Image: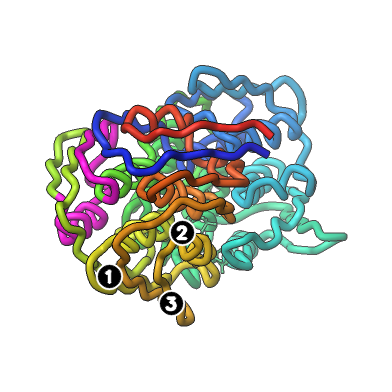
Amino acid sequence: MDSFTIKGGSKIQGEVRVSGSKNSSLPVLFSTVLTSEKCVIKNVPDLMDIKSTFDMLSYAGKNCFFGFNLFSAGEGKKLKTEAPYELVRKMRASVLIAGPLLARFHHVKFALPGGCAIGVRPIDIHLEGFKKMGAKISYEEGNVILKADRLKGARIKLAFPSVGATENLMMAAALIDDLTEIRNAAREPEISDLAGALRKMGAEIEGDGTPVLKVRGKTRLRGFEHSVIPDRIEAGTFLILCAALGGSLKVTEIVPEHLKVLIKKLKESGAQLYVGRDYVEIKAPARIKSVNISTGPYPAFPTDLQAQWMAYMTLASGTSRIQENIFENRFMHAAELMRMGADIKIKRNCAFIKGVKGLSGATVMASDLRAGAALLLAGAAASGKTRIRRVYHIDRGYDRIEEKMRCAGVKMERAKE
Ligand code: UD1
């Protein structure tokens, strides 16, 4: 397991080019199962989660290629309609193979993804939707089996605007020659990106980006070429990094519209931001003001930037409050930040952060992807050296992170263990 050693205290300066979105790439890659024709996807980040998706698609029988941020998939033989536990356990988003396999072959058997560090994360909303489309659900030795003689269009109201469930159901609906309406759908930009790819395949989709999504599918879908949107969470991580460390940074090749709430919150904390067409320039505040946040489904503050915001607020003047409304156990990073000198109290789904004069370097452990990002940020802001263990969590979601951090002025090294 690799670790990072960061020498804290540098000021930020320079420019960082953001990679393609991990959370967009995953469903778009899985949507290639909907057709036997060739699909080409560009701007795909080079990450562990992409490798896991590649492995799952290859196991199913797709002919995959990935290199230089380009992914392609074709098909030479009949696909297997299975996703075994050894592959599924590596990534929760593996469940996104279910919708495409079910829609195309009317059968899928996949291992239940199980829990993870940030909570139980069930898939009941996905399954409820498939049931409405006519699938029969059964369970066998830790696997879920979905079967349908014929899938039909349906009116589905999600119990919560789950990103994964919206994507899974949209992909299945794209291959049903009927109208499916998904109410209380997720509105994240990644949903619209997937809708864009499915349209290129031939599906008719309306309402992406709103709570009511209408999909009129086709009996056959075409191959497609698509370039995924920039990663708004990576962009946000770098903007917060600069605000916390001081200095200025230009974050490029992004869609600033996707970062509206973060930009507003950063301005409230005293940072100056200039928003360009596809970039944002930030100048860090001389004194960080404490700012409360409350996470929620898009367009609210993203839960995937909550940990990084907490690391930032440890350095603010006064006390701030963070309310986490998406995952029940997403404050694991608080304990590690406290080992670096932060003053944080947790009460149910709220964290109260009393700003301190400075953090000091320590050996800490990344418990999940975004918790890892928060520790990177804290380590770069702290005095002395910080060693972050279990960086494989960070590698799941950040493409060439040490190269980009160095570009921004942070001194860090990776040690292979
Ligand atoms: C996606 C993102 C993840 C982000 C999250 C919330 C990907 C690959 N991952 O995850 O980075 O943090 O959205 O923005 O895009 N839930 C249920 N039943 C379900 C499905 C979800 O109870 O069937 C709950 C979850 O446990 C969680 C909440 O709904 O508490 C949100 O989950 P969801 O939006 O589905 O997140 P993911 O798609 O897993």
Find residue 299 and report its horizontal and vertical position in percent.
30, 59
Question: Which is more toward the observer, 11 or 204?
Answer: 11
Secondary structure beneath dot 3 equals strand
At label 1, the amino acid type is: Asn
Q: Does 291 sit left or right of 84 as displayed?
A: left
Q: Which mark is residue 345?
A: 3
- Marks counted in the figure total 3
Which residue is pictured at 37% across the width and 35% down the height?
410
Q: Quadrant of residue 229?
A: top left
Task: Please provide the residue range marked out in magenta.
Answer: 244-271
Residue 148 shows up from this direction = yes
Name the residue located 82 percent from the left edge and 60 percent from the top edge.
142
At horizontal 54% and vertical 24% (from top left) the residue drawn is 71
The span from disc 3 to disc 2 (Cα, nearest Å) is: 14 Å
Q: Position of residue 216 (x, y in %)?
A: 45, 48
Q: Mark 3 and mark 1: span between their CA atoms?
A: 14 Å
Pointer 3: residues within 10 angstroms few (<14), some, or many (20+)? some
Image spot of residue 252 (x, y percent):
26, 31
Name above or below for residue 111 compared with residue 128.
above
Tag 2 residue? 340
Instruction: Report the residue marked by disc 1.
Output: 292
Instruction: Give the image location of residue 85, x and y in percent.
Output: 78, 49
